Image: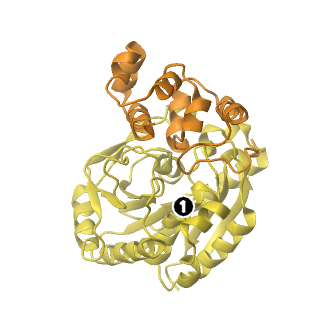
Chain colours: A orange, B yellow
Amino acid sequence: MSLYFTQKLLYELNRDPSLQAAFLEDKEAVLSQYQLDDEELEALRKPDIGMLYILGVNGQILMHYAAMCGYAWPEYIQAMRDALEVHGNVRAGIYATTDGKGAI
Amino acid sequence: MSLVFAGVCSHGPGITGRADMADPDDKATFYAAMDGMREQLEAAKPDAIIVIAAEHFANFFMNNMPAYCMGMGAEYTGPIEDPQWLGIERVTVPGNPDLSRRIIETVMNDVDVAYAEEWKFDHGISVPLNFLTPRYDLDVIPVNINCQGPPLTPLHRAYAFGQALRKACDAVPERIAIVGTGGISHWPATPDSGKINREWDESFLKDWAANDKEALLRFTDEETLRDGGQGGFEIRTFIAISGATEGLKANVDYYRPIPIFAVGCTVGTVDLNQ
């Protein structure tokens, strides 16, 4: 697992419009620049926002990436809730859910 | 001169990005409180505003994470977020590198602060500026306290950082405003979004208003995460303002949990003429 590099890719995408354009143009070329395992690559390619949450991506990084991928706020929250049902709680980091039942 | 204004406010991206999803009274009253904060700020006639924020990976990552960093740029851009998503247009904001340098040099007597001549704002600064300097015509000095990527600076260091900032502001001739932005309890950007621990918030704000240093510094990060969520780590920004205004009581001008904004929305100001 290389959560560090998953988050680093998303951090750089979130703040760099030129990297966003490159990612949209040729996703594989950008992904190849980071040390990612198969599960992370699949979650990034889809994109599977819920799975990225389960892998432990910090919510402050993930919500920006979800917005970049066109997720409206309720869809973003729901994607994480659906993933919790399938995969159980977050595997790493500090963004594990308490009960997954926020007010939104 | 010295400090001419000090306060705190919330900065959640939902405040502007999800404004149309909020209860109308929640939105109207909180926006009115932010307008009131702007009026107090403008009445103080500052030459520059220091915004102590807890950024969210707009500039700093775990490859080189400063506990404290201050901007020393001629200008800053932001927000990094999609403008439509955040509800704030991308703008260029004026900095003041000469003033930044003089303040940073004095702070360095007490705190080993990092500095940055490039800085992109995210909602942590863009949301407060949207209300407080909507014409973007006031020089801004951004400050970040790492509240996102543990290990985090201890609370007593955040207080000491505020004290160092105060000394530095006292040493320059310009009129300086200082605003801390962050949450109290919140679990942002997670399936728990909208959860707010009102009791914990009100207890913290009582201590913040009293500038009760011992009480403000009593939390461990484990306790904060349990009771205040991941967003609770941002109390460091409020504590820095307490350090900058040591000995002075503050007013909580507004507090109301607003779940769609994902935080207990807060405006607080310090009367500097006590």
Chain at tag 1 = B
Q: Which residue is drawn at 43% across and 45% down?
A: B57
Residue B36 locus on image (x, y percent): 61, 60
On the question of residue B101 being in view, the answer is yes
Q: Which residue is drawn at 51% across and 22% down?
A: A42
User: Residue at label 1?
Assistant: B233
The N terminus of chain B: image quadrant? bottom left
Question: Is B159 drawn above or below residue B28 in the view shown?
Answer: below
Question: Is A37 drawn above or below residue A101 in the view shown?
Answer: above
| The one of A40 and A21 positioned closer to us in this rendering | A40
Image position of A36 (left or right of B11): left
Residue A40 locus on image (x, y percent): 48, 29
Image position of A44 (left or right of B10): left
**Where is residue B9, by image quadrant?**
bottom right
Image position of B5 (left or right of B15): left
On the question of residue B86 being in view, the answer is no
Image position of B150 (left or right of B20): left
Q: Residues within 10 Å of mark 1 (few under 14, many from 20)?
A: many
**Where is residue B199, by image quadrant?**
bottom right
Residue B58 locus on image (x, y percent): 41, 43
Residue B164 locus on image (x, y percent): 34, 75
| The one of B89 and B204 positioned closer to us in this rendering | B204
Disc 1 is placed on an element classified as helix
The amino acid sitting under disc 1 is Phe
| The one of A17 and B186 positioned closer to us in this rendering | B186
The tally of labels here is 1
Q: Which residue is drawn at 62% across and 74% down?
A: B251
